[in-house]
Image (spheres, grey):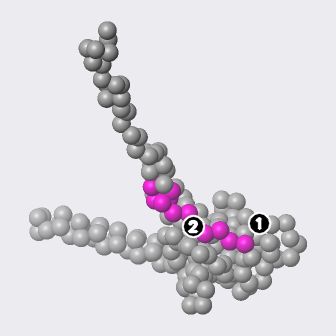
Amino acid sequence: MSRKLPEVLTGLAVIVIAAVFLVYALTQAQALGGSGYPLTAQFSNIGGLTVGADVKLGGVTVGHVTNEHLDPQTYAAIVTVQINNDVKVPADTSASISSDGLLGGNYVGLSPGGSDTMLKPGQSFSVTQSAVNIEDLLGKFIFSMGGSPSKPAASPSASASPVTPEASK
């Protein structure tokens, strides 16, 4: 029995850790499905934006992405976001897709306008800015630094006329 006690304790520890992760996952899922009102935005490119990504206003998370789909007529990406009920968004607010850094994920950033009218549930942002593809930017930068290949300079002896012994007299 003394040899089985560490095995039983290890098994119990694994079960407790798994339960903690399960509770954490369920609370995060509930946070994603919490209350709020939906708004939509149309982008030409959403990059790596995923469902569940944050929506930030002034760097503060005020919602999350709940749906993404392609408009079959315009081939634009339609993103639905859910904004917390306590946050009112002016009608002239712009939405852009930003990156948390080179290795971070994407999020929807909101820049509020100065309108006194607020967006109602189901309305769309009038101004949007699509995601910037960092890989393309880096590729353009690297290839622009290379420049065009230069031609080899002609050697002075090849361009000079040959000197003959008679011409030097």
Position of residue 153 relative to residue 125, above or below, is: above
The magenta span reads 127-139
Under tag 2, what secondary structure? Answer: loop
Is residue 120 in view?
Answer: yes
Q: Which amino acid does label 2 sit on?
A: Ala
Residue of label 1: 112
- Residue 168, quarter of the rendered image: top left
Name the residue rendered at 85%, 66% in the picture: 114
**Picture quarter with the C terminus:** top left
Query: Decide: marks 1, 2 in contact (CB < 8 A)?
Result: no
Is 160 covered by the magenta stretch? no
Asked whether 83 or 24 is in front, the reply is 83
Q: In this view, does 118 lie to the left or right of 150?
A: right
Name the residue rendered at 11%, 64% in the picture: 3
**Picture quarter with the N terminus:** bottom left
Q: Bin the neighbour count of mark 1 within 10 Å (Cα to Cα): few under 14, some 14-19, many 20 and up.
A: some
Position of residue 65 relative to residue 74, above or below, is: above
Q: In this view, does 161 lie to the left or right of 73?
A: left
Name the residue rendered at 70%, 60% in the picture: 58
Q: Bin the neighbour count of mark 2 within 10 Å (Cα to Cα): few under 14, some 14-19, many 20 and up.
A: many
Residue of label 2: 131
Q: Residue 86, image x and y in percent?
A: 74, 74
